[in-house]
Image (cartoon, rainbow, N blue to C red):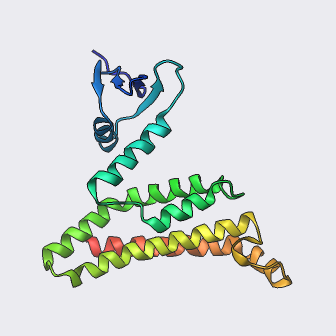
Amino acid sequence: MAKNSGPITIKKYANRRLYNTGTSTYVTLDDLAVMVKKGDDFVVLDAKSGDDITHSVLTQIIFEQESKTGNTLLPVSFLRQLIAFYGDQLQMVVPSYLEHSMAALTEQQEQMRAQLTKAAGDNPMARNMQLPMQLVEDQVRRNTEMFQKAMQMFSPFTLGHSADPGETQKKADTSKDIGDLKAELKNLQDKINAIDS
């Protein structure tokens, strides 16, 4: 039987049960989490109204994962910052920024895993984890800098900058700064590749 190329449809009923129409079975949020990890594409529809509720179900999965594993991925400071963006004029930029940041992290995750494995294999002492962790910290710092520069492009008054004549020149150099950031990111990627080989 040919496999359907579109996303799997999951129906959520009023009794909160989830039904996988692809396998004709009831599933749990844990099952959906496994599907996400395997890369299965699915959409969750309200069984009665037909509304797409995928976003709220994925958010619920994150909530459950955060509360039951004890290994939280979302630090309190991040959650506070995220909440502060709701209703802010820059709210529309945040999803795109987070999506690009996660895509970059996903692309580099295999290299980071290899580095962590190599560092642990060479010597399990914690001091050997400093280099891979430094690489992660550098990437986070660069992502933060890139985000701040993007915010400045949307509003010259964002992040406490004043509109004086010197700011005009800074705005003109924005594209150069972005080019510099890209070069720094490439340099970091080259360093990671060099360590990996």
Q: Position of residue 174 (x, y in %)?
A: 70, 72
Q: Residue furthest top?
A: 1
Q: Is residue 31 above or below residue 62?
A: above
In the image: residue 23, left or right of residue 135: left
Quarter holding residue 164:
bottom right
In the image: residue 103, left or right of residue 172: left
Q: Residue at x 23, y 84 (%)?
A: 127
Quarter holding residue 178:
bottom right
Q: Residue at x 39, y 48 (%)?
A: 62
Q: Is residue 101 above or below residue 197?
A: above
Front one among 108 and 127: 127
Q: Position of residue 131 (x, y in %)?
A: 30, 80
Q: Residue furthest right?
A: 165
Q: Which quadrant of the rendered structure holds the N terminus? A: top left
Front one among 77 and 125: 77
Q: Which quadrant of the rendered structure holds the C terminus? A: bottom left
Q: Position of residue 5 (x, y in %)?
A: 40, 25
Q: Residue furthest front?
A: 15
Q: Position of residue 83 (x, y in %)?
A: 57, 58
Q: Residue at x 55, y 59 (%)?
A: 82
Front one among 116 and 182: 116
Q: Residue at x 43, y 26 (%)?
A: 6
Q: Is residue 21 above or below residue 76?
A: above
Q: How many marks?
A: 0
Front one among 3 and 140: 140
